[in-house]
């Protein structure tokens, strides 16, 4: 029951579509321009750096708030960290598949970045490095996003097995790893078209403070 509640809390927070809302303020339906994705990258390309960072912050903060709320509500529960992951998973689902937008949202990367913040500086540092290094080398947001998710999964396993998540049994840890693995698989699925373009060398590069172009 607690797991379902946390999934629901996360989903409700996740359905707040920052890109769609910002686009409406600017008179643009972000789902009908550019790639059609309601996320940071498409907003950045269509509306510029300020809009991109605003959407990034909004999508990060909604997951951070949801996970922090659950952390507070279940502060004395041994399953606290597991329930936080369920909340993050719900937030990703709400972001990717908002019911009121016919289940067409974003890809959940900025949301996951918010989850990294909620889990502590170790995850923030690893997340920044795992995204920024491949992105700065290649200018492929999709590649940085997929590396970030892969590192996040591996770090969760490492931190769990080294006793970081106090109170969780090995079976609870295995459940946590499974949820994060499912989230990672979903991220790769959401980026399936990007992966095909990466493999063929036709993926679009992104320049934050320069005019974006097709390379």
Image: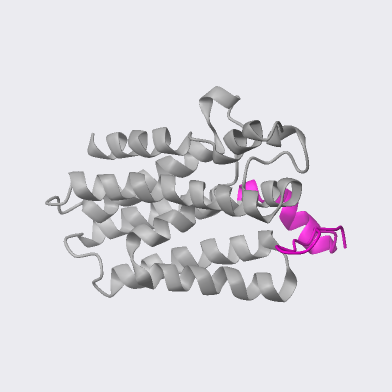
Q: Quadrant of residue 210?
A: bottom right
Residue 196 x %, y %: 77, 55
Q: Nearer the viewer, residue 106 or 83?
A: 106
Q: In which quadrant is the C terminus drawn?
A: bottom right
Q: Is residue 122 above or below residue 32?
A: below
Residue 212 visible in the shown view: yes
Residue 101 x %, y %: 59, 26
Q: Nearer the viewer, residue 26 or 179?
A: 26
Q: Quadrant of residue 157?
A: bottom left
Q: Residue at x 54, y 48 (%)?
A: 108
Q: Residue at x 67, y 35 (%)?
A: 26
Q: In which quadrant is the N terminus drawn?
A: top left
Q: Residue at x 59, y 54 (%)?
A: 53
| Extent of the magenta region | 189-215
Spot the residue most to the right: 215
Q: Residue at x 54, y 34 (%)?
A: 97
Horizontal side, residue 63 vs residue 72: left or right: right
Residue 129 x %, y %: 53, 74
Q: Is residue 106 above or below residue 151?
A: above
Is 184 contained in the magenta span? no
Spot the residue most to the left: 76
Residue 86 visible in the shown view: no
Q: Nearer the viewer, residue 45 or 79?
A: 45
Q: Is residue 172 above or below residue 121?
A: above
Is 209 contained in the magenta span? yes
Residue 92 x %, y %: 48, 44
């Amino acid at each position: 029951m607690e797991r379902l509640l946390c999934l629901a809390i996360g989903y409700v927070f996740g359905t707040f579509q920052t890109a769609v809302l910002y686009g409406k303020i600017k008179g643009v339906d972000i789902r009908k321009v550019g790639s059609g994705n309601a996320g940071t990258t498409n907003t950045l390309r269509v509306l510029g750096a300020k809009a991109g960072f605003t959407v990034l912050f909004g999508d990060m903060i909604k997951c951070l708030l949801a996970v922090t709320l659950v952390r507070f509500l279940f502060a004395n529960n041994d399953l606290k960290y597991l329930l936080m992951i369920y909340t993050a998973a719900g937030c990703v689902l709400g972001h990717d598949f908002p019911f009121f937008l016919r289940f067409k949202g974003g890809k959940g990367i900025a949301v996951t970045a918010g989850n990294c913040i909620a889990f502590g500086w170790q995850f923030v540092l690893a997340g920044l490095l795992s995204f920024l290094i491949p992105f700065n080398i290649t200018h492929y947001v999709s590649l940085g996003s997929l590396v970030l998710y892969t590192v996040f999964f591996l770090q969760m396993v490492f931190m769990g097995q080294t006793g970081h998540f106090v109170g969780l049994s090995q079976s609870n840890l295995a459940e946590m790893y499974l949820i994060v693995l499912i989230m990672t698989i979903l991220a790769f699925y959401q980026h399936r078209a990007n992966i095909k373009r990466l493999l063929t060398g036709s993926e679009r590069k992104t320049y934050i403070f320069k005019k974006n172009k097709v390379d």
